Image (tube, grey):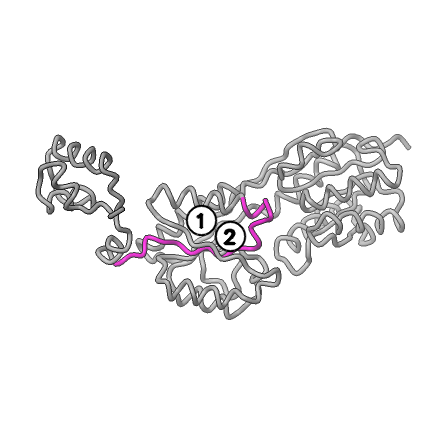
Amino acid sequence: MASVSLRDVAARANVSFQTVSKVLNGKGAVTPATRQRIIEAAEEIGYIPNALARSLQSRSSLTLGVITVDFSNSTPALSLVGIEREARQHGLSVILSSLEPDGSDCVRYLRVLMERRVDGIIMNAPATEEDEEVGRLLRTGPPAVSLHDIAGGGVPTVTVESEGSAALPVRHLLALGHRRIATVTGLQQRHSAQQRTAVYREVLTELGLYDPLLVEDGAWEVEGGYAATHRLLDRAPDITAIYVQNDLMAVGVLNALHERGRSVPDDCSVVGCDDHPVAARTIPPLTTVRMPFFDAGAAAVRLLLDRIASRSASAEDVLPVSMVYRASTASPPAG
C-alpha cells in the first residue's frame, strides 16, 4: 500500500500543500477552522509524518541515545521506562544500547550513537564510572546527562540520594534498639556501594557500634546476599539486624536466615533498598528504602533537553528517598 503524503492530505482538506505543511509541522498561522480540517483529514486517510524529512528540516534527529546496563534487570529498567515515556511526551524517539556487565563495549556504543547524530545521550551505566575514555567522549560529543558519576566530571547528573539510602535504614534499626547491625553491600567498585557503606560506617561509629566484621560483599545478586549472610553468621552469630544494599540481595539474605533457623523479624530484622516489586512479596514483606528510579529517568530527559537548548554548564539533580515500613523489622530479641 502506498504511503499517504502531504499532498494527499491537502487534496482531502481542499487546501494548498503549503498550508498542510505549515499546520503539520507546527509553523505558520492559519485559522482554527482550517487547522481542524487539516488535522481531521490527516487522521481520516492515515497520514504518518516523515521523521527523516522533519529531522532534515530541523537539523535534529529527534532521537535520544541511551546507554544502559542489561535492561532485563528490573531496577534499571524502571529508569528506562521513565526515560522513554518522558522522551515520547516531547516527540522524541529513543535508541537503547545494552552493555556487557563490565561496560567494556561502552566506547563503541557511544561512537555508534554519535555517528547516528542523536540529539543527546543519557548514561545509565555504573560499570563505566571509572572509564576515562567514556568521560572524554561524553564531554566532547553531543549533550549528555548521566544517572551515575562520570570519570572526570563535566557531565550533568541525575542521581538518587545515596546518603539517605543508608542512613535511613540504619537509623530505623537503631531506633528499634538494635546494636549488632550487619550490612550486605553491593560491589565495592561502584560509587553507590562505596557511599552507602561509608554512611553505614559513619552512623555506627558515632555511637561506638561499628564492627568491620559485620560487613560483607553480596555483589548486588540474590546468591551473593545468600552467601554473604552465611559468612556473617559464621563469624558473628549475635547479629540482630542486617541492612542490605539492594532488595535482590535481601531475598538471598532472608533465605539464608531461614536455613539457619533465624526467624525474621523475631530473631533478626532485615532492611533492603530499592523497593523492588519483589519486596512486598517476600516472607515476611520487606522493609526497604524506596528509590525513585522512574522519576530519575524522566528528570534526566528534562535536564538533557535543557542542555540541548542552551548548552548550559554542568549541573546535579539529587532526588530524595523514603522508607517503606513492612514486616521484616522489629525490636531485637530480649537479652
Residue shown at the point (39%, 65%) measured from the top left: 114
Callout 1 crowding tier (Cα within 10 Å): few <14, some 14–19, many ≥20: many
Callout 2 crowding tier (Cα within 10 Å): few <14, some 14–19, many ≥20: many
Tell me which numbered mark, 2 or 1, is placed earlier along the sequence. 2
For mark 1, give the secondary structure: helix
Magenta span includes 63: yes
**Magenta-tinted stretch:** 59-77
Q: Is residue 157 above or below residue 244?
A: below
Question: How far separated are the C-alphas under marks 2 and 1?
Answer: 7 Å
Magenta span includes 114: no
Residue 273 lies in what quarter of the image? top right
For mark 2, give the secondary structure: loop
Residue 281 lies in what quarter of the image? top right
User: Badge 1 is on which residue?
Assistant: 300
Q: Camera-side residue: 171 or 105?
A: 105
Question: Split into 4 quadrants, where in the image is the C terminus?
Answer: top right
Q: Camera-side residue: 200 or 325?
A: 325
Residue shown at the point (22%, 37%) measured from the top left: 45
In the picture, the disc for residue 147 is 2
Q: Is residue 302 left or right of residue 190?
A: left
Q: Is residue 265 left or right of residue 60?
A: right
